[in-house]
Image: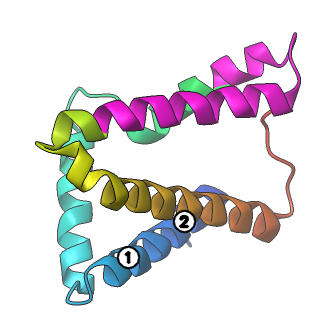
């Protein structure tokens, strides 16, 4: 009998949320497309590169260090500011005309953040566990 861990559930739920998001963004998007995309991402993560989850854990570890001297609210605000600053840089480096693409980029990042926040809140509500973040 296979035991399903909380992380298995969370990954399946995140898959569902991201697939739903992709379908909203591109109505012709299918589950097969999602499976293909997931397989490519999994192959990329099997290389010697650090996984997205491991990178997130490192950011959270650093945030936890800051909570020894700062409030969670200040740390959270700093994380959001850092993400916004980095995502603005990312959008600038990807776009040949950010002035033209600005609203599309903002809408995309806003939708993605909302979906990630919803998925993480849903995970916490479903597990009934307090997060390990200080």
**Image quadrant for the N terminus?**
bottom right
**Badge 1 density bin: few <14, some 14–19, many ≥20, Cα 10 Å:** some
* Numbered disc 1: secondary structure: helix
Q: How is the image coloured?
A: rainbow
Instruction: Give the x, y percent position of residue 126.
Output: 77, 71
Disc 1 vs disc 2: which is toward the camera? 2
Residue 127, image x, y percentages:
79, 64
The residue lying at 23 percent from left, 86 percent from top is: 30
Extreme residue toward the top, this view: 69
In this rendering, the count of numbered labels is 2
Identify the mark at residue 19; answer none if there is no mark. Answer: 1
Locate residue 107 relative to residue 131 in the image: left or right.
Answer: left
Give left or right: position of 75 versus 3: right
Q: Position of residue 111 (x, y in %)?
A: 48, 64
The segment highlighted magenta reads: 61-90
Q: Residue furthest front?
A: 99
């Amino acid at each position: 009998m296979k035991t399903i861990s909380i992380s298995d559930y969370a990954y399946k739920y995140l898959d569902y949320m991201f697939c739903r998001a992709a379908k909203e963004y591109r109505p012709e998007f299918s589950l097969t497309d999602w499976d293909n995309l997931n397989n490519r991402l999994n192959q990329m993560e099997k290389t010697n590169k650090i996984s997205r989850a491991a990178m997130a854990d490192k950011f959270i570890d650093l945030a936890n260090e800051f909570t020894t001297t700062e409030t969670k609210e200040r740390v959270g605000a700093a994380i959001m500011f850092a993400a916004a600053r980095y995502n603005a840089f990312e959008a600038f480096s990807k776009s040949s005309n950010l002035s033209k693409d600005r609203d599309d980029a903002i809408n995309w990042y806003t939708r993605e953040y909302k979906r990630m926040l919803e998925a993480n809140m849903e995970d916490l509500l479903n597990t009934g566990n307090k997060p390990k973040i200080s």
